[in-house]
Image: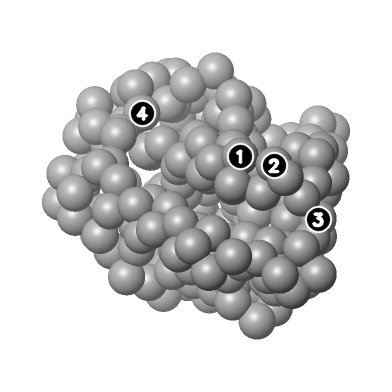
Amino acid sequence: MPAPTTIGFDADDTLWQNEQFFRLTEERFQALLADFAEPKDLAERLLAAEKRNLAHYGFGIKGFTLSMIETAVEVTDGKVPAAVIGQILDAGREMLSHPVETLPHAADTLAGLAGRYRIVLITKGDLFDQERKLAQSGLGDFFDAVEIVSDKSAATYQRIFARHGDGAEHAMMIGNSLKSDVVPAIRAGSWGVFVPHPLTWVLEHVEPPAGDARFRELAHLGELPALLEKIEGV
């Protein structure tokens, strides 16, 4: 297996916090509709709406907000108060303006790798929101390229690593989602490195490809340089 010359990084919950804001907003949503449904039922119905709407709205805060509104209409049989809709919209706007909180080791790790590898940010979600978070993170100068995609598949990684590197077989993808960051990258022929986050969206859960020689798991991003040295035989 060739050593990587290009390294792709996921953004949300790999380089900066993201899922925690969805969880907090969902708790707020449950409080708004406490007179109409139990929290567990609301959570299940909201998740079902999000799954239905991925094909229409894609990933991100805007789709999440629309799914909350749709769920509110459903659980109230169309009688949801306009004031509640207004508060759901307010919650979505607050998420879109929340300050970016980078994760431990993100900046130091990127700084240590920049110039030695081609560094590519590969993230899915809303274009404007991802651009905003990257700009506010202070990490933008470390990347040789930025790819904001609608979804992540083996074909996505093959295309990106051919465009910005020496092909997928000479690349490594780092992320907190086995489903989006690790498994499809390995299928594309790349290394896939899983860096777990304590909060990961349930729709991103799959079994780890533990038997694959190109799969690695790290406790945090600070362990990445040592892994690269080991792979390269340094």
Q: For mark 3, give the secondary structure.
A: helix
Q: Is residue 178 left or right of residue 108?
A: right
Q: Which residue is mark 3?
A: 45
| Residue highlighted by disc 2 | 34
For the question of whether residue 175 can be seen, the reply is no
Residue 100: quarter of image: top left
Which class describes the residues within 10 Å of circle 1: few (<14), some (14-19), or many (20+)?
Answer: some
Determine contact: label 4, label 3, CB under 8 Å: no
Q: Which mark is residue 109?
A: none
Residue at figure coordinates x 51%, y 36% from the top left: 24
* Circles 1, 2 touching at the beta carbon (< 8 Å): yes
Q: Is residue 16 above or below residue 198?
A: below
Upstream in sequence: badge 1 or badge 3? 1
C-alpha gap between disc 1 and disc 3:
15 Å
Gap between marks 1 and 2, in whole Å? 5 Å
Q: Nearer the viewer, mark 4 or mark 1?
A: 1
Residue 31 - label = 1
**Residue that numbered label 4 is attached to:** 103
**Which one is closest to the eye, mark 4 or mark 3?**
3
Label 4: how many Cα within 10 Å (few below 14, some 14–19, many 20+): some
For badge 3, the amino acid type reads Arg
Looking at the image, which is closer to me, 74 or 95? 74
Q: Nearer the viewer, residue 86 or 24?
A: 86
Q: Nearer the viewer, residue 69 or 54?
A: 69
Q: Secondary structure at mark 1?
A: helix
Q: Residues within 10 Å of mark 2 (few under 14, many from 20)?
A: few
Mark nearer the N terminus (3 vs 2): 2
- Distance from the alpha carbon under mark 4 to that under mark 3: 31 Å
